[in-house]
Image (spheres, coloured by chain):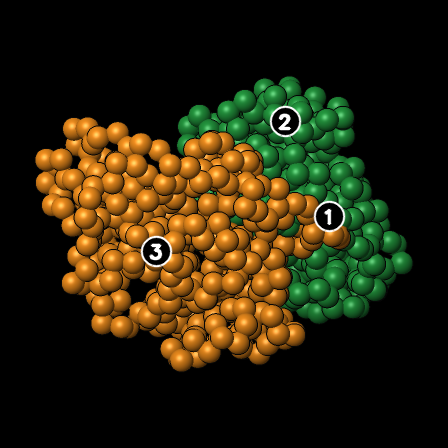
Chain colours: A green, B orange
Amino acid sequence: MSTAAPTASTRIVLAARPHGEPTASDFRTETVELPPPGPGEALLRTRYLSLDPYMRGRMSDAPSYAPPVAIGQPMVGATVSEVIDGNDTGLAPGQLVLGQAGWQTASVERADHLRQLDPAVVPPTTALGVLGMPGFTAWAGLRNIGRPKRGETVVVAAATGPVGSVVAQLARAWGCRVVAIAGGPQKCAWLDEHGITALDHRAPDLAGRLAAATPDGIDIYFENVGGAVFEAVLPRFNPFARMPVCGLVSSYNATELPAGPDKTMVFLGSVLRKSLTVRGFIQTEFVDQEPEFLAEVTPLVADGQIAYLEDIVDGLDHAVEAFRGLLVGKNRGKLIIKVS
Amino acid sequence: MSTAAPTASTRIVLAARPHGEPTASDFRTETVELPPPGPGEALLRTRYLSLDPYMRGRMSDAPSYAPPVAIGQPMVGATVSEVIDGNDTGLAPGQLVLGQAGWQTASVERADHLRQLDPAVVPPTTALGVLGMPGFTAWAGLRNIGRPKRGETVVVAAATGPVGSVVAQLARAWGCRVVAIAGGPQKCAWLDEHGITALDHRAPDLAGRLAAATPDGIDIYFENVGGAVFEAVLPRFNPFARMPVCGLVSSYNATELPAGPDKTMVFLGSVLRKSLTVRGFIQTEFVDQEPEFLAEVTPLVADGQIAYLEDIVDGLDHAVEAFRGLLVGKNRGKLIIKVS
């Protein structure tokens, strides 16, 4: 695959903090010399870069659970890389690994932070999506916070994405009725093909269609988008329903708050009257459970019981444009940049 | 105490569903003949009637966790009554009992729904407040949802009321730093006297004073009021903070939503970034724990370790006026009507 060992890395750095939707001028491409790998480090060439909505938060300096990317530093991100020089770490040249190289073409990383991937079991890109952080977010949030019981109704949005699609298929595997929400007929068709009831949030009267599709109410709403989908879900909650919150993509680019009235107390009123549980989480909270997740879900992915969609975009120079599309739902599935 | 057995009950019935603040014309006083007690029933004379914010919900036919009071039916409510005729149920005349007679002067009730009270241990009115539904709400919500750890910071509003005052004092007994919020200098003085840090939400800059009083952030906010106090608390939450929601008194009389912008997604954004747990509850969910609550808290009340305030208003004919005041914070402590 690779020939000469890279001595430089081309990378995309954050040039300015975006106001609203990120634009090309918020980023800069530069090439830096790579240091030789030190003890315990390996030299890697990036094969695939994951693009995820959480990265919008890292571009901002608003308080959050993780510090922002500093201006002038490369954007962070999960990567599938190929080992070029294992440097006595036990990693063989050509070995594929999951790491955190960020938006760049090559990197030097600590070997003990890398997970070795076996392309004979599942395609290595799955380590960025269905079997990576997004899939684990789905599994951990559904299991620990959603706590589904057989026969309950689970609703999830962005349902062809790497979180939503795993929530939908796991909930079905665990015996729940699933209603999946996605934007546009193409995404809904993919869900239909996989036997999942789908609602297009871009078509009229989502609230009415959601009510019709949830005759027994909603027991779990896995929140990853917020906004209009949240508003349609709220009146359908059953008593003691659970709402894991792992993302609010619809508001990540917002520069001002939605117009009034202020409906915060309407929401809290539902929380009160229906004894709802609303719980935000970051998957790192449950990191101890990751081996269990991989043991359960890897075979389901390998034998096709859990399907997944990937949008693979060729070339790091398209990362900014692709990321812009991610925040407005242009991608259908897991968004991945093929770097080399 | 009593002389002739009552053969009639004077009662306050709901005449119309209030729009906004309840008014006198939403109620009607009538006198009805009482049936003789049937098998397993006792004839009771009402001594004390509890007035609680949840009753505003029962006056409305908006969907809630309990059905509304029907038009023409007596308002519901917890009562301390005196047994007039035990009717072979084992209840002796003169025995004080906790029941649910509602807003009326006498009643016939099922004996197995009554709890016998011993005025030698604690004053019987405590069964309506600190040792009744409000106190149990505080104990159950704090214990099961708040899950306080020693050294954590707990904030509660309406803190001289029967829920808030028990939350504040239990949290202190369980090793937490407590900040109590109340309306007006008199209520704050009562809290100060009992060694509880108090903030007056009617004085300027609640947010600034709350920040100063919670230097380590807020780990538990016991929500019973909503509105401006909630807004001041939100920025102070620590990661993994818990917010039991048992009431939203500030919005119970609202006839329209607050002006915009809509800050619902700001709230959900905090839930997400800080991994907050927001959980509505009604104390009946934890009813199995009531004996444990009484066993723990009764001695604390009996020996003064948990103090309580009562506002006792004389005469059922003042119930509507007193209830109107309850929703706007006119009472200082547990609001009780002395019926006879």
Please state which amino acid type lies under the numbered disc 1.
Pro
Closest to the observer, B325 or B142: B325
Q: Nearer the viewer, mark 1 or mark 2?
A: 1
Q: Position of residue A168 (x, y in %)?
A: 56, 31
Closest to the observer, A311 or A276: A276
Q: Quadrant of residue B177?
A: bottom left
Q: Residue at x 53, y 76 (%)?
A: B185
Closest to the observer, A99 or B80: B80
Asked whether disc 2 touches disc 3, contact meaning CB atoms under 8 Å apart, the reply is no
Marks 1 and 2 sit apart, C-alpha to C-alpha, by: 24 Å
Q: Where residue B338 is drawn, which disc sits there? A: 3
Label 3: element kind: strand
Marks 2 and 3 sit apart, C-alpha to C-alpha, by: 50 Å
Marks 1 and 3 sit apart, C-alpha to C-alpha, by: 41 Å
Q: Where residue A210 is drawn, which disc sits there? A: 2
Q: Residues within 10 Å of mark 3 (few under 14, many from 20)?
A: many
Please state which amino acid type lies under the numbered disc 3.
Lys
Q: Position of residue A322 (x, y in %)?
A: 80, 44
